[in-house]
Amino acid sequence: MPMKQKQHRILLVDDEEGICFTMGRLLQKEGYLVETAISLHEARELIKNFRFDLAFIDITLADESGITLLSEIKESAPSTQVVMFTGRPQVESAAEAVRLGAFDYMSKPVRFETLIAVARHALSSKELDDERERSRANMDAIFRTVTDGIVMIDQDGCLVQYNTMAEQFCGYRNDLLGRVATDINLGCGGGCRAVLQEALDLNASRVLRRTECHSSGKARIVTVTATPVAESDGSVGGAVAVIHDETQLVELEVTARRRGNYHGIIGFSAPMQRVFSMIESLTNIPTTVLINGESGTGKELVAAALHGSGNRSKKPFVKVNCSALSEHLLESELFGHVRGAFTGAIADKIGRFQKADGGTLFLDEIGDISPATQMRLLRVLQESEFERVGDSSTIKVEVRIVAATNQNLAEKVSQGTFRQDLYYRLNVVRLELPPLRERHDDLEPLVAHFIAYFNSKLSKAVSGVSDDVMNLFMAYGWPGNIRELEHAVEHACIICKSNTIAISDLPQDLLAAHQLQFASLNNSPIIKNTPATKLTITEALEASAGNKTRAARLLGISRMTLYRQLA
């Protein structure tokens, strides 16, 4: 449910009731809450009962000057914007109003357009001021809860006081009291003591921002703020330095910058940042995770990130492509077999579940497994045990399951081709990967990443792509997602004869698909397999001129799945 937008409240103060009524109605039509007063007394009563965002006040009132009310409002509610207006404008009154904090000064008669424009401008300015004030208040609260190091020197530059945190940060000791601060050696560069002396000598505050501190034996990043201490007679009695440890903040900033490359996944866009946050929240939780996403969106990379960022990272990460194997081969791969279990089983074989014990098993294309395999997989998820093919001995394992599919499993359940109980077991937590067409902010860094990779792999010196190429990339739908982009960049790097990839360097099937997409936008034939427009296999093959790889992309399934459905 969308958050309800705040309704601004406006105060109108004018001793002419007609003006109050007219201006009030105009502002109410714009959606504002309006209160009117024809005297300072009424205005003061309203101010006691309401919090106003904006006040329009006539300077010339019957009982008193509106300047008085301006002063009172700015004292009691400084965030309220005040606009003064008068029928007898004077330079002196305008200057006084501005000096006391008025946002604007208007002359009567006030035009409707001017009134609304000034109101919008004043309220917009107030929102910015409020936001800055909230940020400042938040920062004040943060700094009040953080314990900083404090060091003080006297007028001769000698150390006279320090607190516990300064002792921990810097290594100050009682035997150093009374010594000239700049002569003290604590195993560091002495930057904080030098800036203290500078503040004392110049009688002015000095800041040493984000300097490295090694005095405690541990490298820290600190900001030192030194301020002179004034005596009652105005003389300088010393200086005090506040040493603020910003090590953690700097590390967080570095992490935030690196977050665009999270466990090998490039993603600066908001959708990918949400994916990264979800991965972090699932890091050390053994819950089964179902990764949904179109072909080529990086489901295997996300599974590896789930494994590699948690406490299972030192244990095995085992992968199985369920669509690449027949039912019997898949059972053998998952659970293992004993010698003689079937024709060709000439020796015992350990299955992927057993290999992944203590770690993570990634089941890719989980939507393609047979009903029999679904039943055996359900048992492992429920009881953490299984038997090898041809064996009756039970094997216990502790494995985290991460499954992935580009299919709609809920729809397969409704069609009766996927077990509902297994679906619920797999779908404990679902992680949706956005397609590349929804990640425009990631296109440039992804292209740069692939160019750098293929430059190294192919011994090329490609520096980037032309504007035309990037514009095409931005406009293209990328049915194959990141995998398709990677192949396109690899092809272009191989073909490119200069240091900049041009349109002519791109794969012909991509250019053809782009032209087909462009034509679809103008002629509106069915091209993409969306929930609103389902393609049949025949329609997909016709749209792709018989190209099965492209047809599979249009259908949103793997090429192997398409081959099996055509068989």
Image: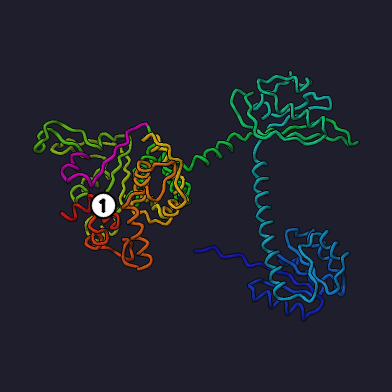
- Span of residues in magenta: 314-334
Q: Residue at x 27, y 45 (%)?
A: 382
Provide residue 137's location: percent of width, then percent of height.
Answer: 67, 49
Q: Which residue is mark 1?
A: 549
Provide residue 449's location: percent of width, then percent of height.
Answer: 43, 41
Query: Front-most of 131 and 449?
Result: 449
Q: Amino acid at mark 1?
A: Thr
Query: Front-most of 152 and 555?
Result: 555
The outermost residue toward the bottom is 18
Q: Is residue 448 left or right of residue 64?
A: left
Q: Is residue 80 left or right of residue 87?
A: left
Q: Residue at x 31, y 46 (%)?
A: 403
Would you place residue 131 above or below residue 327 in this image? below
Would you place residue 43 above or below residue 353 in this image? below
Provide residue 338's location: percent of width, then percent of height.
Answer: 14, 34
**Residue 106 found in image quarter:** bottom right
Query: Front-most of 533 and 78?
Result: 533
Q: How is the image coloured?
A: rainbow
Provide residue 434's location: percent of width, then percent of height.
Answer: 40, 52
Q: Residue at x 73, y 28 (%)?
A: 162
* 322 part of magenta stretch: yes
Task: Say if residue 281 shows up in the picture.
Answer: no
